[in-house]
Amino acid sequence: MHFSLMKRVVTAMALTLLATTAFAEDIRIGAGAAPTENILKPIRAAFEKSSGITLNTISNGPKQAFIELEKGTVDAAAAGLALDDWWALLKKEGVAVTNPGAYQGQVIGKDRVVVITHKDNKIPALSKEQLQGILSGKTQNWKDVGGKDMPILLVWGSLIPGTNSMFTKVALGGTAVTKEVLDATTAEDVKDKVKSNPEAIGIGPAAIVDDSIWSPKSPEVARDITLLTKGAPSAKIQKLLGFIKGDGAKLIK
């Protein structure tokens, strides 16, 4: 190929690449375990394919997700909380929301919180009273709840406060959780630590349950999953909301 022609071809390709990059869209959402595992992760590939918009989730609890939204570093925040409960949590955490009316919340789904154990520890069911004993630290051996003779190891996720508080409030009547826990971060980290420890027990969104772990029957706990924007949802967030309620609905458990 003649040098000048080759140069024009290379230049055209470079300009095309720059144009594609310049017009590429993405969505950044600060999200906790409930929206990530139940909604955003299951729909991501299909949404990106149909819209051409890259969906990025930044793993944050409700508090940090709101702070990032307030700063403008994310397009939206999402949490497994009703909007009023979100405001209450922020107040409890010392985060001032000076103008709640400046934000719009959309319920994008429901989250069911479940108990998980190691796949070889197939306890059929755990009652409210049994869970109260385990989470408070009063019950310390699986044999006391119908399992094997081995100590109970509670895995607790520090980055899923909405999941934790909802479960303890609804299923356990606010029972205080023992400080003797194996620390974890996200719901996936809770799952990984339960998978790695035969004596472990944890809680998390129902969407994390698969053949690698076991989920005994336990008290029903469900809550709203809310997506929050500062002001009205942008055009790209509206596309995401439309997809969640439309074609994406069949991908959500």
Image (cartoon, helix red, strand yellow):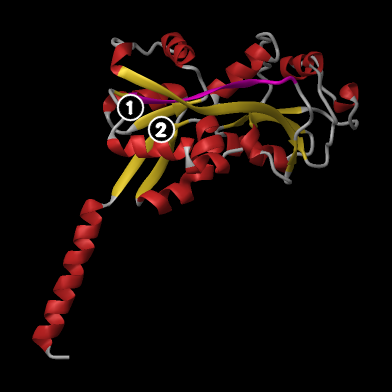
Q: Quadrant of residue 149?
A: top right
Q: Are marks 1 and 2 in contact (CB under 8 Å)?
A: yes
The three-letter code of the residue at mark 1 reads: Leu
Residue 156 on the magenta span: no
Q: Residue at x 74, y 46 (%)?
A: 211
Residue 68 makes an appearance in the image: yes
Q: Residue furthest front?
A: 246
Q: Left or right: where does residue 171 sit relative to residue 5? A: right
Please, what secondary structure does the residue beneath circle 1 have?
A: helix
Query: Looking at the picture, how far across and down is residue 121, in whole percent?
Result: 83, 37
The three-letter code of the residue at mark 2 reads: Gly
Image quarter hosting the N terminus: bottom left
Bounds of the magenta segment:
219-229
Distance between the Cα atoms at labels 1 and 2?
Answer: 8 Å
Residue 226 on the magenta span: yes
Residue 24 position (above or below residue 229): below
Residue 15 position (above or below residue 30): below
Seen from the viewer's position, the closer of residues 64 and 205 is: 205
Image quarter hosting the C terminus: top right
Numbered mark located on residue 69 in the image: 1
Residue 155 makes an appearance in the image: no
Q: Left or right: where does residue 148 sit relative to residue 126? A: right
Q: Earlier in the sequence, mark 1 or mark 2?
A: 2
Seen from the viewer's position, the closer of residues 47 and 161 is: 47
Seen from the viewer's position, the closer of residues 6 and 236 is: 236
Numbered mark located on residue 30 in the image: 2
Q: Residue furthest bottom?
A: 1
Query: Looking at the picture, how far across and down is residue 32, in whole percent?
Result: 49, 30
